[in-house]
Image (cartoon, rainbow, N blue to C red):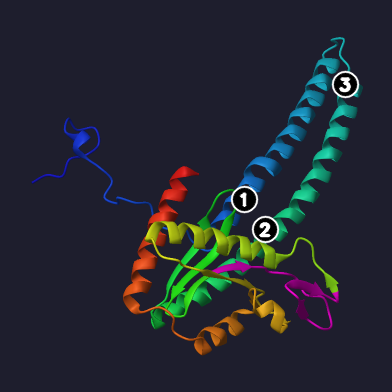
Amino acid sequence: MRQPKFGDRDSTALRHPLRDKPLRNPGQSLDERIDSVVNDDIGASILIALFVWFLAGWELFTELRGLPRMPGTFAVMAVVVTLLAAWRIRVLREKLRLLKLGRDGERFVGQFLEGLRRSGAHVFHDVVAEGFNIDHVIVAPQGVFAIETKTWMKRRGAHVLTTQDGHLLRNGQRLSPNPIDQACGSSDWISDRLSASTGRQIKAWPVVLFPGWFVEQDAATKQRAWVLNEKGLEAFLRNAKRRLPDDEVSMIATHLGLLIRASEKNH
């Protein structure tokens, strides 16, 4: 039997074969922000500068034709707008650099976390919440983990981050905003939604990952969140106790998938 095609009389019978949109990829939110900067912000700056130069050229053309125009005025406007556009593009290039750095870090961590599926874990990336996104969520026999990835450039010399009483320090200075607070907010959001959805008390554990960094974590901070690099997370999970049976892991992962899709539709 011939398959109906768009444009046929019975094309209204066609529907998309996928009932739900695919789940998001690592760093997808940052990809969307990068596209916005490139296509909207930088593109707009270039178009504005080109438009003013067009006006200046038009004024020069009419001057050569003997019409009473003001090419000098428009040329000055073109120079001013071009300088402003160049300054704005320079700022946006730095913003792009940081966004791409963050995106690459999320992709790197996401690819690393995918390997946990072999041990029975379920991995979700770029979970859209209410006004923010959660980089990764793991549902594993060891528990549920909300992961915040921070990809920071390193300076020459020591590459060590430390924690003290729930705060992150770099070169002995407390960082503000505190990434640990952000991870705890993400884990609370996951905990509340999963508990309401499953009817059980489920606690998601906050994790802050710094790819490529060495992190010295004090005992007090460990009671609040894990702060480590990607290899440290693998070791922590390997040594952690199994808290959830396989059927409960599957049940929580199913509820989380439904919650993620519902959240994406609302945003």
Q: Which residue is mark 2?
A: 99
Instruction: Say which residue appears at 75% left-offset and 75% top-offset.
Output: 165
Q: Which mark is residue 71?
A: 3
In the rendered structure, which disc, 1 or 2, sits on the residue that comes first in sequence? Answer: 1
Q: Secondary structure at mark 2?
A: helix
- Measured Cα–Cα span from mark 3 to mark 2: 41 Å
Q: Residues within 10 Å of mark 1 (few under 14, many from 20)?
A: some
Give me the disc on residue 113: none
Residue 86 placement: quadrant: top right
Q: Amino acid at mark 2?
A: Leu
Q: SS for tag 1?
A: helix
Q: Nearer the viewer, residue 251 or 54?
A: 251
**Magenta range:** 146-172
Q: Quadrant of residue 133?
A: bottom right
Q: Which callout, 1 or 3, points at the residue further toward the start of the chain?
A: 1
At 60% from the left edge and 79% from the top edge, which residue is drawn? Answer: 230
Q: Residues within 10 Å of mark 2 (few under 14, many from 20)?
A: many
Query: Is residue 147 located in the magenta-colored stretch of the structure?
Result: yes
Q: Amino acid at mark 1?
A: Arg
Q: Is residue 208 left or right of residue 121?
A: right
